[in-house]
Amino acid sequence: MDLTDELKAFVATAQTGSFTAAADQLGVSNRLTSKYVAELEARLGVRLFQRTTRKVGLTPAGEDLLARAPALLDDLDDLLAEVSEGSRGFTGVIRVSAPVTFGELYVVGMLRRFADANPGLSFDLRLSDAYVDLARDGIDLAFRIGRSEMLSLKERKLGTLRSRLVASPTYLTAQGQPDHPADLAHHACIVDTNRRAPRRWVFHRGEEDLEVQVQGRFHVNSARAAAELATNGLGIAYAPRFAICDGLSAGKLVELMQNYSGDTTTVNAVYLEGRALPRKIRALIDFAVEDIKTSDVL
C-alpha cells in the first residue's frame, strides 16, 4: 500500500470528519478511503480515529499526525512539481472558494485566463458568501472581501474595493438626485445585508467622515441583486464597482455624489498558515495580483 495515499486519506478524513466526505474530496470510493486509513493505522501500530456511527474523531496520536502530515504532503507535492513542471507545466486540481457575486463577476474570468496559460490544471470553484473552513473543506485558496481575523490563515492583498452610490436615470428623474449624504434619509435605499453594517452607509470628504442610517423596501444579501434593483429604478444602491460596472458602462446606472468617497475594504487571497504553499497556488496568487489591476472591478 502506498504511504502517500494512506496519508492523503488520513488528512482528508481528519479535515472533513467522515470517510464519505474524504472520499468525495479525493475522488475515490468510501471503501478505499477507509482501507487506506486502516492500513496506515496498522503500519504505525496505533489508532488514529475514534469511530462512531455518525462521524470520526481524532485520537491523541491522530492529532499529532495531523499537525505534521499536511505540510509533509505539500512538501512532497512541491518537490515532485519542481522536478516535473519544467517540461510539462503545472498539473492537478486547485480548489478555490469565493463570495458568490465577486466570484461570478471576477474570479470565474480570472481563473479562465489563468487556465489558458496552464492547460494541465483543473479547478474546483465553490461560491459561497459564508466563510468556509479551508482545512475542513479541503480548499487550497479563498478569495475574501475584508480582513480575516483567524490566526490559522495567511492572506495577500489583491486590491481595495470602494463602495459607490448609484441609481438609474429613471429613479433620479422621478425622485431627484441627492447632493449630500443626509439627503439619503429621504430616498429609497436598497440595503445589502452582506455588508457588516447594512443600514449604516459611510462617506468621506477630506477629513470629514459622514454616516447616515438608510431605509428602504428592499433588503437583499447580494451586491449584484442590489445593483439590479437599482437598474430597474427601485432605489439607490451602495455597492462595490465589480457589482455595478456593467450598469455604469451601459448608462443604466449613474454614480452619485462623486465629491464624496465611499467606504473601502480589501479583497484578499487567503490560505492556510503553517504549510509550504504549493508552487501552483503561489503562481495563481501572483497571477491574480497582476490580473486584478487590469480589470474593471476595483
Image (cartoon, rainbow, N blue to C red):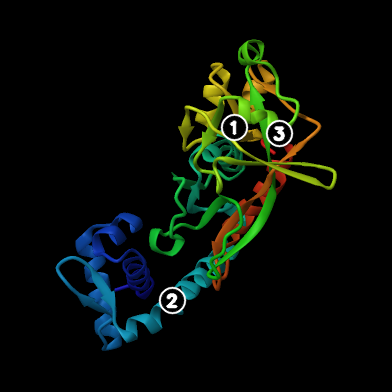
Q: Is residue 20 left or right of residue 229?
A: left
Question: Residue at coordinates 60% horizontally, 61% vertically from top-left?
Answer: 279
Asked whether 101 or 19 is in front, the reply is 101
Which label was assigned to residue 243?
Answer: 1
Question: Closer to the observer: label 1 or label 3?
Answer: 3
The crowding category of the residue bearing disc 3, from other C-alpha atoms within 10 Å (few below 14, some 14 to 19, many at least 20), is some
Question: Residue at coordinates 28% horizontally, 84% vertically from top-left?
Answer: 43
Q: Label 3 sits on what residue type? A: Pro
- CB atoms at circles 1 and 2 under 8 Å apart? no
Q: In this view, does 47 lie to the left or right of 294?
A: left
Name the residue beneath numbered marker 2: 69
Q: Quadrant of the C terminus?
A: top right
Question: Closer to the observer: label 1 or label 2?
Answer: 1
Q: Label 2 sits on what residue type? A: Ala
Question: Residue at coordinates 56% horizontally, 46% vertically from top-left?
Answer: 197
Q: In which quarter of the image is the N terminus?
A: bottom left
Query: Residue 144, relative to residue 112: is it above or below?
Result: below
Identify the element where label 1 is drawn. helix
Question: Closer to the observer: label 2 or label 3?
Answer: 3
Which label was assigned to residue 181?
Answer: 3
Label 1, label 3: how far apart the Cα atoms are: 21 Å
Asked whether 44 or 273 is in front, the reply is 273
